[in-house]
Amino acid sequence: MLQKFMEAIQAWITEHVVPVMNKLTSTYWFGVISDAVLYIVPFSMVSAIPSLWNIIRRFVPALPDLSPLTTFSFGLVGMFMAFIIPHNVAVKEDRKDRSMIAGFTGIGAFMLCMNPTITDQGYVFQMAKFGAGGMFTAMVVGFVVGFIYKRMARMTFFSEDSLVPDFVKNWFDNIIAVLLSLFVAWLFTNMLQVDVFSAVAIILSPVTGFAQTLPGTIAIPLVMDTFYFFGISGWVFSPIQQSIQKSALAENMAAYAAGLAPTNINAYGITRYIMIGGEGATLPLAFYMLFAKSKKNKTLGRATIIPSLFNINEPLVFSTIVANPFMFIPMVLQSILLSANAYLWMSMGWASLHVENFDMNFLPNAVSAFFMSGGDVRNIALVCVNLLIAAILWFPFFKAADNYQCKIEEEQAAEKAAKKAAKKAAKEAAKAAAAAAVE
């Protein structure tokens, strides 16, 4: 009965939800922004090295300060985003000749929106706006500049048979798009006196505010894991997830650097306590499968345990969990309970909020949790507690699924043996008939 119910749900999702998700992920602007998020990952990973170094430096103060490596990598991802989005738009419009200038225009408009303070020494910018703290604004600016370039992709001052060199044509053909993009930024910032960064923050405050509540902390992994169960990778939501959580982490890092207490629980890296072994907290499941009774599960356990230690679980999920009615309840429950437990631990002060960017998700979760918390061993304890919770959740459902698989294998073995016996009997009967015919 349960299997039929799950099959009905899967059929409904396949018919109604999957087309919507496919349509969403294949849209023009979703593709542009999701690609842009992927481009900044290397800079986020680079900043993990200074984060590790700074923890060591606490014990050896004589070591040099490598914080500038973070400031000028992860600390500039907002500016990089403002470049990448219009650049990608130009490439998608098959105007690679304009892509670099489109990206530079995005940076110019982004910096214009910062409305720097003018002093006797020159212009003063707030570095925090260049990084993840300004990522949402960078997306908005990048979208506006990209939209302008998209509309003007085919516009040119020259005919196809013009003798003017292509690079000269490109200079003039970019003028209006550059001018219009900067004019829009100037209009809001200088003429209308709008603080674009504050305006974007106010508009998104219901979303970012909800994300820092207990329901908001649960909602993101719950949605991701539910869709993952039905075969839609939760990474579809990564542009939204990373934008929210990296901005929250940037605020924590700024507060920590200023000697203040961080306030954002749902910051980048909170998944270290939720996605243990990969999305769905499947590390215990991979371990259980090593000792499975069924041949299929034992073989899969041997194949997936090592990748699971490094948070790579796609082979495990698609071979064992997706559309498996035995696995739906633990897949949903762990996303709720682990998220809630992580939130409660941090809100109660039993573990530290994240104040360092350590974007090494392929390392064991306890390692990342330790460094992102600034070296708090209590965060390792939180990983261990959540691992135990996940292990308890997965065990009874794994046993039921494994027993069911054993019955299937036994039936298949019996059917195979019966076919083999029937084939042997038929062969012997044929021999006997042939011998009788000879006689």
Image: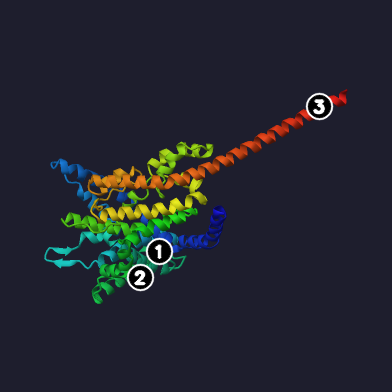
Amino acid carrying label 3: it is: Ala
Q: Indicate the secondary structure of the residue bearing disc 1.
A: loop
Amino acid carrying label 1: it is: Val
Where's residue 134, x and y in %?
Answer: 27, 62
Q: Quadrant of the C terminus?
A: top right
Q: Residue at x 48, y 52 (%)?
A: 328
Circles 2 and 3: CB distance less than 8 Å? no
Disc 1 to disc 3, C-alpha distance: 94 Å
- For marks 2 and 3, give the one nearer the viewer: 3
Q: Quadrant of the N terminus?
A: bottom right
Q: Residue at x 26, y 77 (%)?
A: 192
Instruction: Point out the tag, 2 or 3, that comes first from the N-terminus.
Output: 2
| Badge 1 density bin: few <14, some 14–19, many ≥20, Cα 10 Å | few
Of the pair 406 and 256, the residue shown nearer to us:
406
Instruction: Specify the label residue 164 is tagged with.
Output: 1
Q: Please state the total of marks drawn on the protein image.
A: 3
Q: Which residue is mark 3?
A: 432
Disc 2 to disc 3, C-alpha distance: 94 Å
Where's residue 275, x and y in %?
Answer: 37, 49
Of the pair 235 and 171, the residue shown nearer to us:
235
| Badge 3 density bin: few <14, some 14–19, many ≥20, Cα 10 Å | few
Q: Indicate the secondary structure of the residue bearing disc 2.
A: helix
Which residue reaches farthest top?
Answer: 439
| Position above or below: 365 against 339 | above
Instruction: Point out the tag, 1 or 3, that comes first from the N-terminus.
Output: 1
Instruction: Specify the label residue 176 is tagged with.
Output: 2
- For marks 1 and 2, give the one nearer the viewer: 2
Does residue 35 appear in the picture of this structure?
no
Q: Residue at x 43, y 54 (%)?
A: 332
Disc 1 to disc 2, C-alpha distance: 19 Å
Where's residue 258, x and y in %?
Answer: 16, 57
